[in-house]
Image: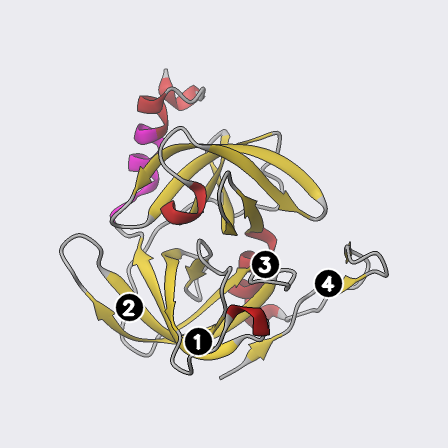
């Protein structure tokens, strides 16, 4: 299992220093996509992770419903020290998936949203998030199974994780969005105050049923302003 450390150092004030970046190389393209898209989510009653995507003329965030709240909920995302407002236009409590429109963030550097199914057990995946006390941590792991329940099917990954990773999106090696981190198995009964990432089983809600076309339709139905809604 490969643990990849944060790609930014903390300054003396505790804020990220953008001048120091870990380079992953060409073979880690999906990791770079994951890192560039990851944001810290601050909602009304919770905090977690999210992932930004370009979708036609929109910038959207994919996260977990228990992080962002229900449809119509608002909050802020933080990326590279800058804050942006988001509004949830779709939230599924049982699937634990939410889609939001992010205002004021440009699409430069963001990957176009494409959802996909895993190709096989053993497939390598990556995600980046903001677990407690960490700044944009990136992890690589392996798809080891699935819990295909009727209302909340989930992929199971053997990967490093920690509390606060909820809402982060797992990418395959093609840079496609596969699932949203909804929970972890605390196999060693560790306490969240320990602030140490652990190798564990992490559960990701599948995104394959949420095609780009469907997400645009949900955004338009909610009332998001887009050229695609005309």
Residue at image coords 56%, 78%: 3
Query: Foreground: 86 or 75?
Result: 75
- Chain-order first, disc 1 or disc 2: 2
Query: Foreground: 124 or 79?
Result: 79
Residue at image coords 44%, 57%: 166
Q: Secondary structure at mark 1?
A: strand
Label 2 Cα crowd, 10 Å radius (few <14 / some 14-19 / many 20+): few
Which image quadrant for residue 26?
bottom right
Residue at image coords 86%, 61%: 12
* Boundaries of the magenta span: 209-218
Q: Which mark is residue 119?
A: 2
Residue 23 in percent (x, y) is at 69, 69
Task: Name the residue carrying label 1.
Answer: 159
Task: Name the residue carrying label 3.
Answer: 35
Disc 1 or disc 2, which is closer to the eye?
Answer: 1
Label 1 Cα crowd, 10 Å radius (few <14 / some 14-19 / many 20+): many
**In the figure, 31 relative to 116: above or below?**
below
Q: What separation in Å lies between label 1 and label 2 (alpha carbons)?
A: 18 Å
Q: What separation in Å lies between label 3 and label 4 (alpha carbons)?
A: 11 Å
Q: Residue furthest right?
A: 12
């Amino acid at each position: 299992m490969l643990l990849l450390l944060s790609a930014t150092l903390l300054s003396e004030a505790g804020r990220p220093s953008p001048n120091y970046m870990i380079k992953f190389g060409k073979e880690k393209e999906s990791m770079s996509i994951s890192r560039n898209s990851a944001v810290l989510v601050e909602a009304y009653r919770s905090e977690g992770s999210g992932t930004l995507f370009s979708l036609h003329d929109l910038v959207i965030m994919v996260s977990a419903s228990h992080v962002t709240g229900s449809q119509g909920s608002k909050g802020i995302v933080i990326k590279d020290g800058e804050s942006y407002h988001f509004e949830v236009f779709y939230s599924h409590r049982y699937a634990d998936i939410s889609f939001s429109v992010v205002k004021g963030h440009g699409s430069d550097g963001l990957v176009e949203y494409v959802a996909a199914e895993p190709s096989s057990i053993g497939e390598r995946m990556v995600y980046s998030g903001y677990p407690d006390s960490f700044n944009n941590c990136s992890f690589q792991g392996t798809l080891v199974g699935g819990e295909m329940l009727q209302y909340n099917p989930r992929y199971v990954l053997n990967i490093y994780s920690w509390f606060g990773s909820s809402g982060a999106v797992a990418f395959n090696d093609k840079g496609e969005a596969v699932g949203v981190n909804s929970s972890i198995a605390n196999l060693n009964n560790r306490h969240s105050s320990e602030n140490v990432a652990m190798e564990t089983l992490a559960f990701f809600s599948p995104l394959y049923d949420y095609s780009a076309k469907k997400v645009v339709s949900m955004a338009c139905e909610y009332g998001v302003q887009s050229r695609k809604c005309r």
